Amino acid sequence: MTVLRSQLDVSSETYASHRTAQLEVLAQLDEQLELVVAGGGERYTQRHRERGKLPVRERLELLLDPDSPFLELSALAAWGTGFTVGASVLTGIGVVCGVECMVVGHDPTVRGGAMNPYSLRKALRALEIARVNRLPVVNLVESGGADLPTQADLFVPAGRIFHELTELSSLGIPTVAIVFGNSTAGGAYVPGMCDYAVLVDRRAKVFLGGPPLVKMATGEESDDESLGGAEMHSRVSGLSDYFAVDEHDAIRLGRQIISRINWRKLGPPPSAAPEPPRYDPEEILGIIPPDPKVPFDPREVLARTVDGSDFDEYKPLYGTSLVTGWASIHGYPVGVLANHRGVLFSEEAKKASEFILLANQTDTPLVFLQNTTGYMVGARYEQGGIIKDGAKMINAVTNSTVPHLTITMASSFGAGNYGMSGRGYDPRLLFAWPGAKLAVMGAAQLAGVMSIVGRASAESQGKPFDEEADRRRTAAIEAQIEAESHAFHITARLYDDGIVDPRDTRTVLGMSLSAVHSTTVAGRRGFGVFRM
Ligand code: COA
């Protein structure tokens, strides 16, 4: 039998205290998500409605199939910066007429939907996800273009949006622009580069330069309608393929377009009627210790994540601080690599490398559950070749071509982040739990290293070492690194695709697996499996 048996005591004090701590972190997350949903706030939302326009989330709801789920991405983009949390754009994967699509929607209530450097990174990441997973893209357009005060950080990389849209088209991945309002200057190229454009009557404004700019440039007198209205673009310029009488009509037309693209997923379908886990996902909250230094058994998480809690463990007696094995999630077969006791030794690195090669031989997607403090240091381990073994694992992760999905459960430090398919290793989607911490090393360790380096430097120069100043500096560095390791700080900078409630792990992985199966699922072949 390969069904996991949980050892979790749900009546214990430890369980209760873990759960309480997690609920507190989740309350902080909810607070931020409420701000995201509020967008530009009451005043701008009311003004938007008074203009007879729908907020972006209502546009999205009308676009998606009724009662279908939406996997929102990078919801906390720009958190902790001077920009509105969420970064004035909404992105995510949803189902339109039965087709999983990437949706990119401007929020016109936040500074007129203008794109700041975080909005740009968020939009570009969404388009990249669409490209690598072969997801049609629907743009809900209404934006003031570049956030002008930050144009220096924006203008050059923003050109990539048109590049991505064009590349999607060249790969046969359909792109649709539904234009609800302003889409001027650079924004005009969104309907310009998309395969299909729908423009809303008397609302869409699609021109390279508005009336004041035209007047300045050529002296010509003009107005919004003649320069870029839906009627003109539908009857005269031909930029618009579909003339919509209002917003509802535009969304109806967008759905109609998707219903005609004759879309077929290229990956194998999931098995029918997969079994739910035998243990309640709700209990995951009681597994996670609030102190990320305290390890926990990822099998307890898997027992609440994989189909039927059925986990066929690979090499369970070897390299035991990394758990590897086969399972399925919502009917999709997966190989799982999950850290157990944090540190990766040579055995774990070799076991991971072999396992990744095996998954590639059988075209099986990989799920990485990160909770690692990195590869082991020390003379014994260096002499044992930890660098070479870590390099094997990083090589295997780099060259693996099956889809990778990564969840940062708790710690993600050092090269362990790389070996466990962190952002730099192109996982198709990467999420974090809200209590996760990510950095080159732990805050205390990093501050301690800096103190040792400072002391050695003073000694080598024959200078006295100010112990009091060192204590202050060490405390300041530790606080800085602690803040920068926080999950909100990481997700704000687009180093993952969003923070997820640990209880939703199975659902999020299921939706992600479904999305990645939009394209072919094929492992890398050629070398066979190296036995290490
Ligand atoms: N960059 C930075 N801030 C912008 C902005 C931009 N491109 N466009 C609008 N904003 C700000 C406004 O200053 C205003 O801020 P405030 O409320 O604190 O005063 C807020 O966003 C809302 O703008 P407002 O003009 O009141 O909204 P609107 O819905 O009536 O009009 C636009 C929206 C986008 C049509 C209009 O603001 C506009 O034309 N913006 C400039 C567009 C442009 O030239 N972009 C450059 C293209 S590359």
Image (spheres, helix red, strand yellow):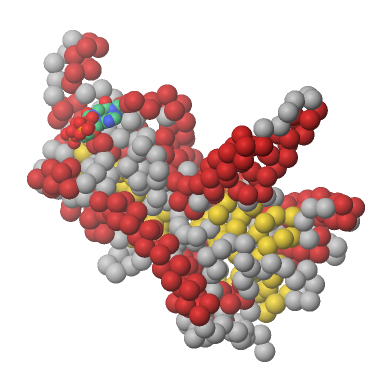
Rendering quarter of residue 348: bottom right
On the image, the x and y values in percent for residue 340 come to: 67, 68
Residue 465 higher or lower than 502, as above or below: above
Q: Nearer the viewer, residue 488 or 452?
A: 452
**Could you tell me which residue is drawn at 29 percent across and 56 percent down?**
34
- Tell me which image quadrant ligand 1 sits in: top left
Q: Residue furthest left?
A: 50
On the image, the x and y values in percent for residue 377 come to: 79, 53
Left or right: residue 162 versus residue 427 is left
Is residue 197 among what the camera can see?
no
**Could you tell me which residue is drawn at 58 percent across and 39 percent down?**
472
Q: Nearer the viewer, residue 208 or 439?
A: 439
Is residue 203 among what the camera can see?
yes
Left or right: residue 145 versus residue 275 is left
Q: Nearer the viewer, residue 274 or 195?
A: 274
Residue 93 higher or lower than 122, as above or below: below
Q: Quadrant of the C terminus?
A: bottom right
On the image, the x and y values in percent for residue 445 come to: 67, 49
Residue 276 higher or lower than 381, as above or below: below
Q: Residue furthest top?
A: 219
**Could you tell me which residue is drawn at 74 percent across and 60 percent down?**
344
Q: Residue furthest bottom?
A: 1
Residue 176 higher or lower than 455, as above or below: below
Q: Quadrant of the N terminus?
A: bottom right
On the image, the x and y values in percent for residue 46 come to: 13, 47
**Could you tell me which residue is drawn at 19 percent across and 26 percent down?**
227
